[in-house]
Amino acid sequence: EAGVTQFPSHSVIEKGQTVTLRCDPISGHDNLYWYRRVMGKEIKFLLHFVKESKQDESGMPNNRFLAERTGGTYSTLKVQPAELEDSGVYFCASSQETGRVGGTDTQYFGPGTRLTVL
Amino acid sequence: GIQVEQSPPDLILQEGANSTLRCNFSDSVNNLQWFHQNPWGQLINLFYIPSGTKQNGRLSATTVATERYSLLYISSSQTTDSGVYFCAVGYNNNDMRFGAGTRLTVKP
């Protein structure tokens, strides 16, 4: 079974440009999360999708960040315009639906996208 | 929100030594995971361990949910164990809260 995949693995852009990160969760996982680690700090939650709906977006830093999950499958995270402080590693994770028999809350993380804003 | 504290923040070992990493959390959780962030920045899931004890090779973990802490044991450490170890906790399918991590350096 394929794990969570993220694209690109690394992106280098200039301040003011736009970048779109993509996450493909594990097939069948309804829950999809975005996290990021910036400037060597702890990893922080950004938002949580259940299928195509935003369950919790309390961690989104500002309106320069826009996340979508088309048809409840893959998700994109767009940063427009990017600022220097957006540099860091952006992680995506997915988990099975809550309450599923034999299910687990384990969040499976992708390898991350390293974003560098110059 | 839930507070997660990890200790020690930094740990330097000689190859072959054993170590214990600790994670304290401030509230009831039913999801606790340990991760290893490798030198390439990737997060590797080590254990899903909301309670009890698990072992995987040289690694083992124990969570005492009633006392709100978890321990990660690394035995016979190798240079490839170097990196940052994160503890993360959550409740149901809500977001996970990460600790600041323990940076482990294993010297040959």
Image (tube, grey):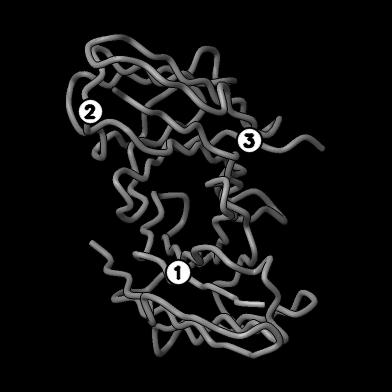
Label 2 to label 1, Cα distance in Å?
25 Å
Quadrant position of residue B58:
bottom right
Q: Return the residue at label 3.
A: A29
Marks 2 and 3, the one that precedes in the sequence: 3
| Residue at figure coordinates x 51%, y 27% from the top left | A10
Residue B13 location in percent, x, y? 56, 84
Query: Residue at the location (31% across, 18% down)?
Result: A79
Q: Which mark is residue A84?
A: 2
Chain identity of mark 1: B
Coordinates of residue A76 in the picture (x, y in percent): 46, 18
Q: Is residue B78 left or right of residue A84?
A: right
Q: Residues within 10 Å of mark 1 (few under 14, many from 20)?
A: some
Residue A65 position (above or below residue B18):
above
Circle 1 is placed at which residue position? B103
- Residue density around tag 3, few if under 14, some if 14–19, many if 20 or more, within 10 Å: some
Q: Specify the farthest residue to the left.
A: A62
Distance (Cα) linking label 3 and label 1: 31 Å
Q: Amino acid under label 3?
A: His
State how far apart marks 2 and 3 are (Cα). Answer: 33 Å
Instruction: Name the residue at the top extreme.
Output: A17
Q: Which amino acid type corresponds to the residue marked 1 in the rendered image?
A: Arg
Crowding at dot 2, Cα within 10 Å, few <14 / some 14-19 / many 20+, comes out as: some
Please state which of the two labelled residues, at mark 3 or mark 1, is closer to the viewer. 1
Q: Pinpoint the chain carrying mark 2.
A: A
Secondary element type, mark 1: strand
Q: Secondary structure at mark 2?
A: helix
Q: Position of residue A29 (x, y in %)?
A: 63, 35
Depicted A65 relative to depicted B36: above or below: above
